[in-house]
Amino acid sequence: MKFKVPKIIRKLDLAGYAPELEGVCVDVWVNPPVGVMWRLMGLGASTSSASRDLTPAPDLTPAPDLTPAPSLKGREEEEEEKEEIVGQQRIEALAELWGWTVEEVLELVGATVGTDPRLFMWMAERTILMVNEHRRGIKKG
């Protein structure tokens, strides 16, 4: 290739969330690799468990299963574990897109969860929208 495609950074102005935050901006990397977006959408975590769950048994005539069905509590714990993994992947992806550390993203979450929990979600949603707009060629004027 004759040139290297640079990281394209756009400003996310938090005044769009609240006028009191005018002048506070977060840099957003709008042309990340697809893998970063997959992690942000929570698609990276389920790949290994999904492929494990879909692997067919070598014997096509399975023996009757005499073990008791897993308890609902076990399933709930498994779902919570998956949600935790997906949540961690999303935090890592946002940190990468914002040029922050994971600790800085968690600090933002911790600082706003009790006073303004919608701020973090708004920032994440706007980040996804900015990346999608860039990919679709939508220009902001």
Image (cartoon, rainbow, N blue to C red):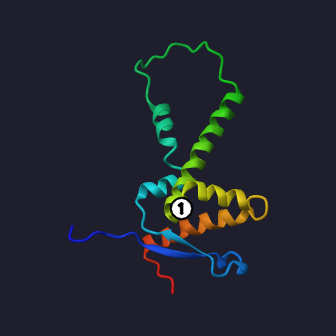
113 to the left or right of 70: right
Q: Residue furthest left?
A: 2
Where the N terminus falls, by quadrant? bottom left
Q: Residue type at mark 1?
A: Trp
Residue 65: x and y in percent read 57, 15
**With respect to residue 91, does 10 lie above or below?**
below
Please state if 75 lies on the left or on the right of 27 as rendered: right
Residue under the point 69% across and 25% down: 71
Observer-nearest of 75 and 80: 80
- Residue at the image point whose x is 52% and y is 42% from the top: 46
The residue under the point 63% across, 77% down is 24
The image position of residue 2, as x and y in percent, is: 20, 71
Quarter where residue 107 is shown: bottom right
Task: Please indicate whether residue 78 sits to the left or right of residue 131 in the image.
Answer: right
**Element class at badge 1:** loop
Q: Which residue matches tag 1?
A: 100
Viewer-proximal residue among 111 and 58: 111
